[in-house]
Image (spheres, grey):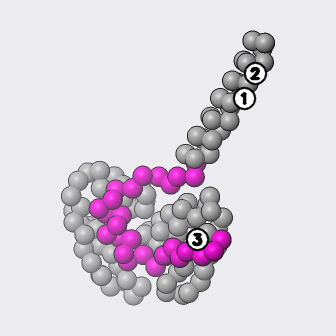
């Protein structure tokens, strides 16, 4: 009887462990809220709800991507990172958002070292 209980508890624990690991993989990396939300306004990638989940829409070209539900947040992060490398620039304590023709759209003041570190790790700038 003890072997059956041990086996049952082992299988139960394994399912919980796998569930937790898969949830952690599905959640994208933490972001510095103030900077990310200020930059996100200018990103051409937006999420659109549809019957089967979410669609990523490039507002400049109208191209739509339909990644699976588990990949959608990771994919929009990838697209934002690509866009940020070519459209964001750090000068002194300011983050500059550049337009398509290399014109400055807005300056965002970098308040803390955490925000600067986030820009370096997330956008690579």
Q: CA distance from mark 2 to mark 3?
A: 40 Å
For the residues bearing labels 2 and 3, Cβ distance under 8 angstroms = no
Task: Give the Cα distance between marks 1 and 3.
Answer: 34 Å
Q: Residue at x 29, y 62 (%)?
A: 34
Mark nearer the N terminus (2 vs 3): 2
Q: Which mark is residue 23?
A: none
The span picked out in magenta is 25-52
- Mark nearest the camera among 1 and 3 is 1
| Residue picked out by circle 3 | 54
Q: Nearer the viewer, residue 42 or 81?
A: 42
Position of residue 82 measured from the top left corner of the image (x, y, whole percent): 50, 69
Residue 92 appears anywhere in the view:
no
In-front residue for pair 2/57? 2
- The furthest residue to the front: 1
- Say which of 108 and 52 sits in front: 52
Q: Is residue 83 magenta?
A: no
Q: Is residue 19 left or right of residue 33?
A: right
The numbered disc on residue 11 is 1
Describe the element under mark 2 as helix, strand or loop: helix
Q: Is 56 drawn above or below residue 117 in the view shown? A: below
Image quadrant where one finds the C terminus: bottom left
């Amino acid at each position: 009887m003890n072997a059956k209980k041990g086996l049952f508890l082992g299988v139960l624990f394994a399912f919980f462990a796998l569930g937790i690991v898969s949830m952690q993989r599905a959640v994208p990396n933490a972001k510095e809220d103030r900077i990310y939300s200020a930059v996100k306004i200018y990103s051409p990638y937006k999420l659109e709800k549809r019957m089967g989940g979410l669609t990523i829409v490039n507002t400049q070209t109208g191209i739509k991507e339909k990644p699976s539900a588990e990949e959608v947040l990771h994919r929009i992060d990838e697209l934002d990172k690509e866009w940020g490398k070519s459209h964001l620039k750090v000068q002194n304590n300011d983050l500059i958002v550049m337009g398509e023709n290399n014109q400055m759209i807005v300056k965002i003041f970098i308040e803390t070292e955490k925000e600067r570190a986030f820009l370096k790790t997330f956008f690579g700038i």
